[in-house]
Image: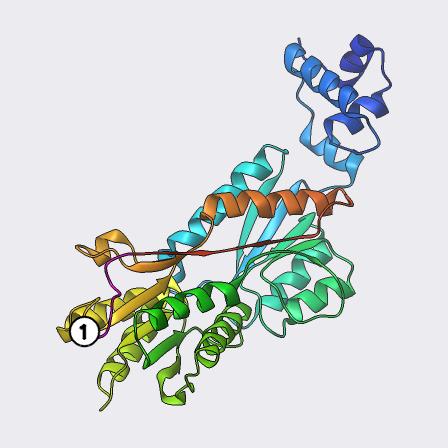
Amino acid sequence: MKVNLKTLSDSLGLSRTTVSRALNGYDDVNEATRVRVKAAAAALGYHADPTARRLATGRAEAVGIVYPFGAGDLGDPRFGEVVAGMTEALAENGLDLIIVSARPGAELDSYRRLVGSKLVDALVVARTLVDDPRIRFLQDHKFRFVAYGRTNTSQPYRWFDFDNEAGARAATERLIGLGHRRIAMVSAPLSMSFAAQRREGFLAALRDAGIEPDASLLVETSFDRTGGHEAMRALLGRAQPPTAVLVDNNIAGTGVYRALVESGRKAGTEVSLIVYDGVPPDVAFPHTVTAVVQRTGQSTGHIIAELVMDAINDRKSSTHRLVQPTVEPGDTDGPPV
């Protein structure tokens, strides 16, 4: 026998409105009632009609993330981990995660379609920019969103981020402490928030140590393995190559590591290397690359999903999370020879 909302409501002695709002997580229903309603629904085998529920709540019961996929993005394990964590946590709240693949440079078109069609209840803005038109668009349209990263805007918004400046500073201070003075940095495009913040942390650490930054050792490259490979080859080909290199992302970091190996130089002795999020073990074998380590992708996804649920339900909770990274020693850095 199929149990409908009326049957469930009658069994509890509650109104259908109260039961419906309890099942959909509204804050105006107290916690004890929500627990009681959900327990009864599970015991009786009640499953809400998705179409009827969407009509009743006015929600799409889905969250979107617009992602400008390039050829190298499918090989980014961290992105997969974050998506897995978001999917898992949102599913526990009855929401689907929709990934919309956009042409690089044309993401706003996808945002306009999603917002205009009301296909999702909220959006996650990935890879934020220093000056981000996507966030301005969502704020102008008063559409719920969570940014995976910070940006320059005067209006408050929900975001999750790592302390990128602190992570790069800690890695640079480690290299300085080992005795390095010619330290290079390979960066993703500096229009991206994380890259600009990590570059600033790197420069601040040099200046605090009395080391004048060498502009020729600051390399901005494409956000892919090829860019990292070419950047490292150019650095190692200089008349005075760096004795240490910090890479601000794991994708370019893989290319940097391969270029170092191909050069015949010994990692950790002839050239020290630290990479944000490290290099995959199968690529780095037999080495373990010293890394700036951040919270796992899956747990990051859980936190972003929690912020999304707060946004959807208009909860007056914390609007952002800033997480501190740490440096995890490997065998690719050491004193200069």
Q: Is residue 252 above or below residue 64?
A: below
Secondary-structure class at tag 1: loop
Q: Position of residue 202 (x, y in %)?
A: 45, 74
Does the magenta stretch mainly form a helix, a strand or a loop? loop
Quarter holding residue 20: top right
| Left or right for 1, reference 245 | right
Would you say 202 lies left or right of 41 here? left
189 sits left or right of 116 in the view:
left
Which quarter of the picture shows residue 327? bottom left
User: For mark 1, does the 10 Å Cα neighbourhood hold few (<14), some (14 to 19), or many (20 or more) residues?
Assistant: some
Name the residue that disc number 1 marks.
270
Residue 72 shows in the view: no
Going 38% across and 57% down the picture, which residue do you hit?
76
Q: Is residue 124 magenta?
A: no
Residue 108 at what x, y percent from top left? 63, 68
254 vs 168, nearest the viewer: 168
> Given the image, on which type of amino acid does mark 1 rest?
Glu
**Residue 331 part of the magenta-drawn span:** yes
Q: Which residues are magenta?
A: 330-336
The quadrant the N terminus occupies is top right
Residue 317 is at least partly visible in this image: yes
Residue at coordinates 17% horizontally, 55% vertically from top-left? Answer: 286
Question: Horizontal placement of 47 versus 258: left or right?
Answer: right
Q: Quadrant of the C terminus?
A: bottom left
